[in-house]
Amino acid sequence: MKHIYLLRHAKSSWKDLRLTDHERPLNPRGRRDAPRMASHIKKLNIEISEIYSSTSRRTRETIVPFIETQGLESSNVHYEQDLYHGSPPDYEYIIQNLGQNKDHVMLVGHNPGITTIADQCSKRYIDNVPTGGFLILQADINDWQLFSFYNCNLVNMIIPKAL
């Protein structure tokens, strides 16, 4: 059994319109929600062995508390340009090329990709994964190369508003 966690970045700021989309930081709510979510995930005893994150500033800021609460080393954190507004095939490609010794990985990105993936893995329609939303997916496979969002299940979705 493989476990995939998808995290949509926390709420970002539109305050400085001179910044590119890629460089937008978290806003105050995002800076509050990211640590709360990371702490909650840790309390649920969810183990994350590797993080693959979009290169955007808001995703890099979102993962800091997850790195800290999970006690991850910098060698367990990877930044992937393909996750910056990536589509489900971009996420699948990264997952299919993971090392076989990794059973609990988190990918951090953006909408609409995250919500599209949630819909593919769920038995119900999901209109929107909100900022800071954390998806728990399971795939009954032993080899990441066999991974597809069509052969995994959305087990749970945790959102900051529910905490």
Image (cartoon, rainbow, N blue to C red):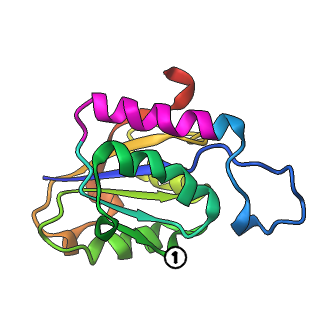
Q: Position of residue 89 (x, y in %)?
A: 44, 72
Please say whether residue 125 is visible from this viewpoint. Answer: no
Q: In the rendered view, does 158 fall on the left or right side of 70? A: right
**Label 1 element class:** helix
Q: Is residue 94 above or below residue 128?
A: below
Residue at horizontal 37 percent and vertical 47 percent from the top: 68
Predominant SS of the magenta segment? helix
Q: Which residue is mark 1?
A: 82
Q: Position of residue 41 (x, y in %)?
A: 34, 35
Q: Position of residue 142 (x, y in %)?
A: 10, 63
Which of the 4 image quarters holds residue 76? bottom left
Q: Start and end of the magenta stretch?
A: 31-46
Q: Is residue 30 above or below residue 105?
A: above
- Amino acid type, mark 1: Asp
Which of the 4 image quarters holds residue 95? bottom left
Q: In the rendered view, does 155 fall on the left or right side of 131? A: left
Judging depth in this view, the residue of 114 and 108 nearest the camera is 108
Crowding near pointer 1: few (<14 within 10 Å), some, many (20+)? some
Judging depth in this view, the residue of 10 and 89 nearest the camera is 10
